Amino acid sequence: MRDIAYYPGCSLKEAAKSFEDSALKVSEEMGVNLKELSRWNCCGTVYSLTDDNLMKQLGPIRNLIRARDEGSDELYTLCSMCDNTLKRANSLVRGEEDKRDKINNFMDQENDYEGSVEVHHYLELLRDDLGWGEVRDRVVNPLEGLNVAPYYGCMLTRPKEIGLDDPHDPTVFDELVESLGGTPVDFPYETECCGSYNTVDNEEMVLNKTQTITAGAKKSGADVIITACPLCHFNLDSRQSDLLEVAPNHKPVPVIYFTQLMAIAFGYPEVNKFAEHAIDPREVLELKTKAGSER
Amino acid sequence: MLDKPETETLEIFIMGKKYEVPRGLTIMKAMEYSGYQYIRGVGCRGGFCGACSTIYRLEGDYKLHTDLACQTTVQDGMYLTQLPFTPAGRKQYDLEELEISNNPLLDLYPELARCVSCNTCTKTCPQDLEVMDFVNEAIRGNVKEVAELSFDCIQCGLCAARCPAEIPHHHVGQLARRIYGRYQAPESEHLKERVEEINNGVFDDELEELVNLPEEELRERYENREIES
Amino acid sequence: MRTGKLNRNDSAEEDPYSESMRESIKKVEETREERLEKEVDMMDPDERDEVLNNFHPDYKEEGMRSLKVGPNRGDEMPLELADLLEAYPAVDPSEVDLTKVDYEVDVLVIGGGGAGTVASLWAIKEGIDPEDVLIATKLRHGDANSMMAQGGIQAADRENDSPAAHFLDVIGGGHFANKPELARALAKDAPEILNWHEDLGVMYDKNEDGSMKTLHGGGTSRKRLHSAKDYTGMELMRTIRDEARNRDVPVVEFSPAVELLTDSDGTITGALLYNLETDQYYVVRAKSVVMATGGFGRLHIQEFPTTNHYGATADGLVMAYRAGANLLDMDSVQYHPTGAAFPEQIVGLLVTEKVRGSGAIPVNREGDAFVYNLEPRDVEAGALIRECYGRNNGVETPTGMKGVWLDTPMIDILHGEGTFEDNLAYIHRLYTRFRIDPTEDPLLVFPTLHYQNGGIEINDEGRTAVEGLFAGGEVEGGVHGKNRLMGNSLLDYNVFGKRAGIAAAKRARETGWGELTLDHAKKYTDQLDNAGVDEKRKSPMLVPEYRGEETLSRSIDVL
């Protein structure tokens, strides 16, 4: 078993617990132990664009310092929001010397940090390190006939400097779905914003976004949407059930984490806890796949 | 009384006023030595109650230090004041009615989410607790970790006074400990059984007999009682 | 836990112990292995008597005098207390307008520590509206000795134990002077009290199956000491206080009661509070009054340092005595065997009995053990004084204080590395702050004034002899006789705070408000006049006088 340093983020310990559970399971299957940092804090949630308030950069940078102090030069993430925040904070440290100095001066109980840790998303582990062949080899229930809409949202691919794929035409999810034996559907809203934190105080806007994205996926023939973001998941899943109350003709599409899809294909459906989803994916998955079959 | 040994003195500044005090005193005793009689800013004098929060600076040092007046020795040139009170929003709740399936800590204290992990709370804590770590555990809903990491908190409130996110850490810790103790810690079966026995009067006769025993006989029973090793 | 930042006191690298102390420590280290294998025998009853008679401060005649006025006239008690009881009211009755009532409540609780807070919670459970309760307290709510208890709370909840065994320990430890019905209430209520704490979310130390971790205390026949690390008092007090806050119990802080109010028959009808910050008086009319002001450690009886909090100045005894309450066992003071004797900054602070309960043994200058580690407190304290002053085997500090070693490194040797820091976090922190690591070096200790064994006489409902006045906690007497055992003070404030709160609530439901006078104080003043007491002597004390030289640590003139 190979250890890799892993930063979970808060959501994966709470609302998105099944994202983490499924990731841990499928990793183990591929001989990888996601070794959680022994101490970590919130990533900062959203990368702060305020130029003169470096306070907001302390959270993400402190996590990178912790990873370094625990002896890791690489750190893996699952949540695309955390991935984005950590990577951008790292870029800031690497690229802007005066801000780096200011931050290091403020964090006077820690040793200076200069950007030595490399942050990766778990999808990069699959694509660039293990390779799709490794994924394919673990599949026991190929997802034949399952149409999957890859939903990237904003955080995985933008901005370009830190994105893990082409921001205009990302393919990593498509490659994953194919490796699992499923069919990626071409889907015009795959990098459309879900509405993000507007969900807190502008519900209507998020409902509109949710309708556009999920109806678009449906129209493209998707049985299920996959995501790597707990917030996208909340908006597309929970808000879709709110949407059904105002738009009863809406045809719901279940939204799941990509690692949950892997868990089905790898034969570990029990880690997924689909009953907690607002739009229950079980019926469509069982219809189209051997979702219930364990190895 | 023995003769007081000759003591070296040093200079401190209490709220900006200069005083000369013997070396080796705690801040609390140095203030008293200087003529202050405490009403606020004092409590147990032993490091338990959190009443004597003090902030100070030292010459040539940019830091604003925080500590307990009863547990800290004065240093030459110390520039200090005490906090008489630390306002911090505490939420009312009914432990029996609390919705604990979600994240009760974040539900009651949504300001937890404002934490930017600056670590000021940890640096401020006179108990040297990992305050920022338990705030982050609170955000994640990990009640047990919050309870354990915050257990030695004396609720002085210095962290809350310094926090840029305006979190009342000590109240969050208190809430977590009570939730943990009430709902998550394993229950003590032998305690419940004993309470039931007492309520059923199992020990009443024996106690009644002892209460009415003449002293001589009591003494004999006491001296011959079996002692668990 | 990471304690990297502690020891901010003095950055110097030098050894905190003096050279001669370090030499003695070497002897302690040399004998340690031997001592790990061989326990010291418990004293027989005759030797105990001898130690007490010759070395316990209670038996020192010059420290006592007999009271000239009031219900306990003729009783011997410490000079410092007698001076406060034989003193004129601090309040000038002509300054106060009793017709202007500031608070009108069913139950007034005087004292915001453990007993008072418990009393208020149970008065509410008994049906009193929280709005009709008032806690008046001198410092902040919860600033009390209750907060400082370290070692634990006794309750006979294990299978091999029983309330009867607990009772026998209490009454034997108290030298059979206890009121038996009070000792019975203490032992019998204990498990129910712990159960209540569990419901409130107190985090007791437990094993994985939920069973309680228990230890011996001095003078216990069973392991029945329950703890929450060595912050037991803090964990209980802050939890109970949190519950009072949730229940909206009104608390008025920095406003101690300075005199009770009575009607013409002497029934208690309220109290006069004094706002320490604004110098204003508040008149409180109440149907029942619970006295819960705690003890008298800050009187520094016989010049001893104390473990007690700043407000422990016997105010409740003074007020109740003037109103006609009887006091019990006031000649008996508890000196905790192990107070810190070094470093200077923490002299007198408590080193919990749990340290001895966990296997640390008192050792003299030569490294020899001289007393069983868990004698009842008065005997253990007497033995330490004998070692220092009777046999001259104590260790002297640079400021002339004497003490013996408490061999704390034994704890991790006996129970495994990390035990000390996990279970005795307070002590660890207390000493680490001053650069002494108790897992590496022994601690120097000497008895310290800890507890008021006696107090206002109550019955097993918490009623005093004065109509309308109830009492709970350290201020009352009779529960512990002449010596309280470890772990029974936290229990006392819970059991009798609860009983007093319930009884006060019942009385409040059955009676109305009475007239408000200071007649009893005037009558008492007449008695003082007749006895020729110095008119300048005033009480209650409220806060001790430490200004100027007074604050410098007191050296002890023991014998």
Image: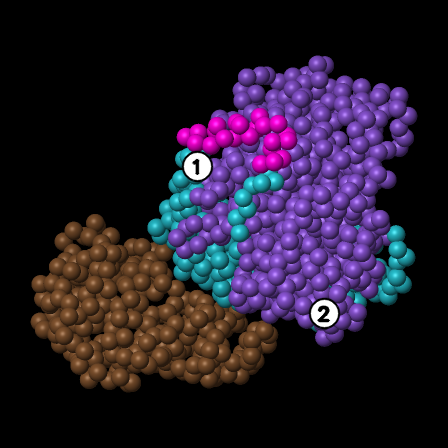
Chain colours: A brown, B cyan, C purple
In front: B193, or B226?
B226
The answer to whether marks 1 and 2 mark residues whose Cβ atoms lie closer than 8 Å is: no
Q: Chain of mark 2?
A: C
- Res. C514 image quadrant: top right
In front: A27, or C384?
C384
Quadrant showing the N terminus of chain C: bottom right
Report x, y in % for residue C431. Answer: 67, 62
Horizontal side of A219 relative to B11 (left or right) equals left
How many numbered marks have been drawn onto this rendered protein structure?
2
* Disc number placed over residue C27 in the picture, else none: 2
Q: Is residue B209 magenta?
A: yes
Q: Is residue C70 above or below residue C275?
A: above
Residue occupying the point 67% across, 21% down:
C466
In front: A284, or C387?
C387
- Res. C30 image quadrant: bottom right
Secondary element at image label 2: helix
Magenta: main secondary structure equals: helix
Q: Is residue B118 above or below residue A64?
A: above
Residue occupying the point 34% across, 50% down:
B101
Horizontal side of A81 relative to C474 (left or right) equals left
Report x, y in % for residue A82. Answer: 38, 71
Region rendered in magenta: B199-221
Q: CA distance from mark 1 to mark 2?
A: 49 Å
Residue occupying the point 33% across, 72% down:
A78
**Residue A162 visible to an observer of this rendering:** yes
Q: Is residue C266 above or below residue C308?
A: above
In front: C290, or C81?
C81
- Of labels 1 and 2, the one closer to you: 2
Q: Chain of mark 1?
A: B
Q: Which residue is mark 1?
A: B195
Q: Is residue C259 magenta?
A: no
